[in-house]
Image (cartoon, rainbow, N blue to C red):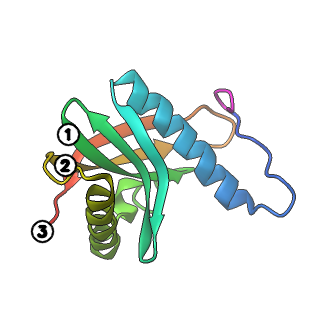
Amino acid sequence: MPSAGTHQLPSPGVDPRQQFGRDGEGAARDALRSCGYVILAERFRVAHGEIDIVARDHETIVFIEVKTRRGRAYGGGAAAVTWRKQRTIVRVAEAFLARARLSHLPCRFDVVAVDWPTGQGPRTEIIRGAFDAR
């Protein structure tokens, strides 16, 4: 796990951007756990997409998209979750709920925006109910 202000060096053959995203997911996991979320799955993938983190917040299943950025030049992490990405996340969430037999529980879609300027530690913002399934 990277310490504050640093992220891990990528393994040979790993794109530095992918490593930066993984480090952001680690910062997001830490923030979510500190807020009482219980992580159920990471990088849950089906044929038509992936969800970064699936967690439980009390009795609610939460599907979480993590967006890590060096700065807010392009609107910050949350702005990157387009309607197309939302639609994909909803479809993948439906597959998770069916596979885990949890369709009877309420669910929510959150975004964790990780702002991680070069040479500084990550700052996370959990946006609860960032979008809905409609």
Residue at mark 2: 107
Q: CA distance from mark 2 to mark 3?
A: 13 Å
Where is 72 relative to 94, above or below?
A: above
Where is 35 relative to 95, above or below?
A: above
- In which quadrant is the C terminus drawn? bottom left
Q: Amino acid at mark 3?
A: Arg
Where residue 89 sits, quadrant-wise, is bottom left
Identify the mark nearer the N-term, 2 or 3: 2
Q: Which numbered tag is attached to residue 134?
A: 3
Mark 3 lies on a secondary structure that is loop
- The residue under the point 64% across, 27% down is 4
Mark 1 lies on a secondary structure that is strand
Q: CA distance from mark 3 to mark 1?
A: 18 Å
Examine the residues drawn in magenta and state their main secondary structure.
loop
- The residue under the point 39% across, 64% down is 80
Q: Which numbered tag is attached to residue 26?
A: none
> Is 133 left, or right, of 18 in this rendering?
left
Q: Amino acid at mark 2?
A: Cys
Instruction: Say which of marks 3 and 1 sits in front.
Output: 1
Where is 72 relative to 74, above or below?
A: above
| Contact (Cβ within 8 Å) of mark 1 with mark 2 | yes
Q: Which residues are magenta?
A: 1-5
Q: Position of residue 41 (x, y in %)?
A: 45, 46
Residue at mark 1: 60
| Contact (Cβ within 8 Å) of mark 3 with mark 1 | no
Instruction: Say which of marks 2 and 3 sits in front.
Output: 2
Dot 1: few (<14), some (14–19), or many (≥20) neighbours within 10 Å? few
Identify the mark nearer the N-term, 1 or 2: 1
